[in-house]
Image (tube, grey):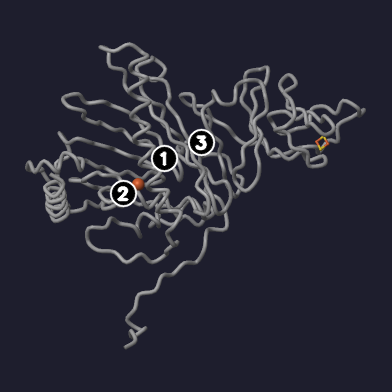
Amino acid sequence: MSTDTATVRHIESSGAPDRFARGWHLLGLTREFDDGKPHGLEAFGTKLVIWKGADGNLNVLDAYCRHMGGDLSTGTVQGDNVACPFHSWRWGGDGKCKEIPYARRVPPRARTRAWTTMVIDGQLFVWHDHEGNPPPENVTIPAIPGYEEGEWTDWVWDNTLVPNSHCREIIDNMVDMAHFYYIHKGLPTYFKNVFEGHVCTQYYSGTTHEEAAKGLPIAVGVAEDQQTVSDATYWGPSYLVDKLWTKYGDTTFETILLTTHYPVNGSSFMLNYGMVMRKKPEYDDATNDMIAGKMLKGIGAGFYEDVKIWLNKAPIDNPLLCEEDGPVYQLRRWYSQFYVDVADVTPEMTQRFEFEIDTTKAVDFWQKELVEKAAQKA
Ligand code: FES
Ligand SMILES: [Fe+2]
């Protein structure tokens, strides 16, 4: 017996977008780049060179020298400029060739692409816009209150390259309530999304598999007093700030977890993630740093569970959804604003949209499953 093909759902996929997203993209922590040497980084389908000049500025240029294609990231820093290893043309952070040591004059149009940079709380960003416009003033990255005052630990940081995946895969996570249970050993009890303008937020609270397996009643839809409470916001297409409150025993730890990425090319991306923890006054700095490091390790392990899925899944334009899935289509519409010209951004992409998932059935079913599994083990 063959299946009637007219009633079968087929996966549609129109392929990856033909450009990179418009927005601020985090390249890494400034501490990775400020040693007075040029650093190379593959991003946006090319290679970039990053260096700190004698003037203290961090600069980002296209790495391939416009003279004969030398790789500036394998050159040297000379004063404020970067010198190409091939014929020593000196390039300034503004993209202009400042000097050719063996030539009487620099060709007046000797100019390469300089990337607009921004430094916030020890993080280096570049602005990418397919149309070449500068960043609008209202599109920025929020600083962490109290970071400069030393209220938080130092960054603990890690990254991983995700090959054969478009970075839009990571965005779907924002609305994906159920995967927290199946992938991250969480049990969400409250889950809500709000999109507006270039900002997209996920409000999450929940408990853990371990806690739920104890069989104690779990409050549904209540945001406070859970094992994990999280407000996670994308500021633009690639920079996710997650304010997290995690309970261990009687102690709640407040952390800010960043999950950020930049496209390496059209089919792979670099995932950068890091964390600061609000220092506990009862501990010294080394202990606070150690706790933050441990927490990031656990969270990092969670990312690799996501990565495993991305590496094996198919891109899908038409996901088949049930009521307990979040607003995937609305989220993708929000995300699409970063892949069209500014003139083509429609109100549907940016207008306020809110959606809360009813977790009643899910919480009940998942807890039963966990309690049963625990009983089988005992
Ligand atoms: S290729 Fe860079 S100086 Fe010649
Ligand atoms: Fe995930």
Q: Give how far apart the Cα atoms at labels 2 and 3 are.
A: 26 Å
Per the image, the residue denoted by label 3 is 26
- Quarter of the image for residue 242 reads top left
Q: Earlier in the sequence, mark 2 or mark 3?
A: 3
The residue nearer to you, when weighing 294 against 337, is 294
Q: Tell me, yes or no, whether the two marked residues, 2 and 3, touch with CB atoms within 8 Å.
A: no
Q: Give how far apart the Cα atoms at labels 1 and 3 are.
A: 11 Å
Q: Does ligand 2 reach within 8 Å of label 2's beta carbon?
A: yes
* Element class at badge 1: strand
Q: Give how far apart the Cα atoms at labels 1 and 2 are.
A: 25 Å
Q: Tell me, yes or no, whether the two marked residues, 1 and 3, touch with CB atoms within 8 Å.
A: no
How crowded pointer 3 is (Cα within 10 Å; few <14, some 14-19, many 20+) is rated as many
Measured as percent of width and height from the top left, residue 279 is found at 31, 18
Quadrant where the C terminus sits is top left
Mark closer to the observer (1, 2): 2
* Position of residue 203 in the picture relative to residue 306 (left or right): left
Going by the numbered disc 3, the residue's amino acid type is Leu
Measured as percent of width and height from the top left, residue 295 is found at 33, 29
Per the image, the residue denoted by label 1 is 235
Number of disc labels: 3
Going by the numbered disc 2, the residue's amino acid type is Ile
Per the image, the residue denoted by label 2 is 183
* Element class at badge 2: loop
Considering only vertical position in the picture, is 287 above or below 28?
above
Measured as percent of width and height from the top left, residue 45 is found at 62, 48
Going by the numbered disc 1, the residue's amino acid type is Trp
Q: Earlier in the sequence, mark 1 or mark 3?
A: 3
- Quarter of the image for residue 251 reads top left
Farthest residue, direction bottom: 1
* Element class at badge 3: strand
